[in-house]
Amino acid sequence: MKKEVIYLEDKNKYLDSVISEIPENAIIYKKITGIGATTLEIKTKRNSIIIEPNTPVILGKTAKHTNLFGVYEGVRTSDIITYLLDEKITYKKLMSTPESFEKIKRAFYMTDINMYDNYFLLFDESHKLTSEIDYRNTITQPMQDFWKFKKRSVISATITNFANYPIFRKSGFRDIMIEPRWHHALNVNLYSSNNLLQDIKHFLQHIPKEKDNRICFFINSIDIIVSIIQTLNIKDISNIYCAEKSIEKLYRKGLNSVSSELTELNQYNFFTSRFFSAVDIITEHKPHIVIVSDAIKAPQTLIEPLLESRQIAGRFRNGISTFTHIAGLDKNIEAKKYSELKEYLKEQRNAYIQLKTIYNSAVEQGVRQVMKEALERVDISKYMEEDNSFNYFMTENLLDSEAAKAKYKTWQDFILSYSLDEELFEIENQYNNIYDWESEKLKISSSNSKLLRKEIVDTFFNLELNKGSETEEQKVILEELKRKDEFIVEICQNFDKEFIVRKRYSKQQLTLALIKKKSDEKSLSFPVIEAVLKSFKIETAYTEQEIIKKFALIYRELGLRKVIKATDIHNYFDVSARRSIKRKDKFQKGYKLLKSKFNEFRT
């Protein structure tokens, strides 16, 4: 895939000064944020659907563009239908979260409008497809329909590896980079030490003392945010911006200036990952930006500088004063190298395919149930598609997260992460401090997980959810309990309350009990595999017709009703490429069997 370049000549102009519309069927990497790419699509004279990662982005855009209709939690399908049928609006513009895209589909279906032919689909901030899928698998839901659109593109100011994904290449996507002609490196200050709190204090002491200073911390940890505010005693001059589900927890801790939407900045402002990209933060101030990462106590705070630092700085459309990254390192952190990960995934995939074949071949229902649960629980399953190919978004997420961890092992690793590309970053100051162990530290309270488990167990059984969730209220409560701790809900669904109390809510004891219960099934038996291995011979060629005939006999004898394909042979043997095989002076297509995948089952 050859890379195309669109150059921006003037830093005071936007993307619409060089192109009239967002290119179709393209992977677009814009090297800088704030160039008006999303605005260009909103103004382009065509019907379009724009996918944005989070609701705050949509609220910000719809407030500025009256022709734009936002779709997110709380917006009804009927509201979308009313908008679609409004003849006063010439070009329809829908902006949706990934999770609400289903409502758009329903609206189009009910209005008998073919969105796949008549609308352009743009997935904005598309790097989120890989960066968030590990904890938010719903983010890729629109991608199932993405390929049905005649005109579609993905765009991000964070570099992705999409150009190497087979599906993008197969679909003939263009690889486009939008590059500015001016110097655009981000000036950064880097801190690391044995004490995050002292580094934060050092930073605050050394910024210029101005009356209207605004400090913006980007930290993906509610506990660290709370600790900083309490330790610095800045509760009354701090705002916290986070997801809706975290607001109640912060209220309980006595923090009231909390919102899931942007408000006027306070002197100190704390943002969780919900606000790391896409959101336009409009303010007259040029704030000081601080990222805080803690490799030991809060690994979820680790970011990949190359992928996220410039995104964070780009949130502020009026510019920033300084950019600082404070990191707590971990010399014992383990991170696999890229080549090691690729080999690991390959080995895991082979094992997964064998396990899946065992499941598909099992006759007894008890066996199938055990194997189904095993397939769902093995780690590699989340990286696999139904056809046994890799889910490229999930595998990329793993590769990126391992690469991010590697940046926080040593001071040299951390510095190097900002030194690899001088076009993107320029390091202004480096502070590798060592503080006395007696110095005050952040006190990060660990949540009482056993107490939380007890609370969930009490709620579950008091509401008799063990007898099923029949009412809507019960269903809502059950989902809420799962969000808090899905494991303990599964325990409640498998054991009575007395048993759980007897185990003292211990996760280890309850885990072992659950494993034992699921293991107490009949002895495993896999007659299909045994029959297949005895019916075919290694180093022998079979035509597709012969393969189908043999499988038909096996299934008939075992009393199975299955759709038969010649390619089923791949599940049991390593085979040659499809080849011509001579039978009775005629050539037919087939395969040569090279190696059994289940030698241990041969008798």
Image (cartoon, rainbow, N blue to C red):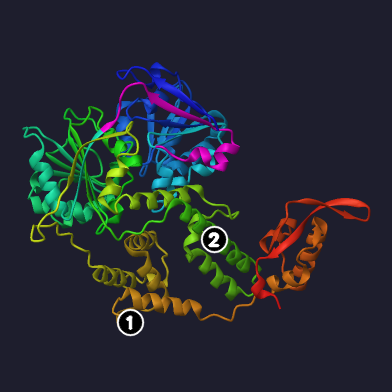
Kind of residue sitting beneath label 2: Glu
Residue at 63% of width from left, 75% of height from top? Answer: 364
Frontmost residue, 362 versus 114: 362
The x and y percentages for residue 392 are: 50, 48
Which residue is drawn at the image coordinates 32% and 49% (left, top)?
Answer: 407
**Magenta-colored span:** 159-186
Q: Which label was assigned to residue 564?
A: none
Q: Is residue 276 left or right of residue 84?
A: left
Instruction: Examine the image and state in which quarter residue 251 appears.
Output: bottom left
Q: How far across and how far down the image is residue 166, in percent? A: 57, 42
**Residue 149: horizontal and vertical position, in percent?**
55, 34
Q: Name the quadrant of the C terminus.
A: bottom right
Count residues near mark 1 (Cα–Cα under 10 Å), then give few for <14, some for 14-19, many for 20+. Answer: few
- Asked if residue 67 can be seen in this view, the reply is no
Q: In the rendered structure, find residue 498 and report the number of the disc placed on it.
A: 1
Q: Secondary structure at mark 1?
A: helix
How much space separates mark 1 and mark 2, taking CA atoms? 42 Å
Q: Residue at x 7, y 42 (%)?
A: 205
User: Measured along the vertical axis of the image, is residue 545 above or below residue 181?
Assistant: below
Q: Residue type at mark 1?
A: Glu
Q: How many badges with numbers are in the image?
A: 2
Residue drawn at (8%, 57%) of the image: 439
Residue 183 magenta: yes
Q: Residues within 10 Å of mark 2 (few under 14, many from 20)?
A: few
N-term-proximal mark, 1 vs 2: 2
Residue 108, compared with residue 318, is above or below; it is: below
Depth check: give the residue in front, 589 or 142. Answer: 589
Is residue 381 visible in the rendered image? The answer is: yes
Q: Which residue is mark 2?
A: 347
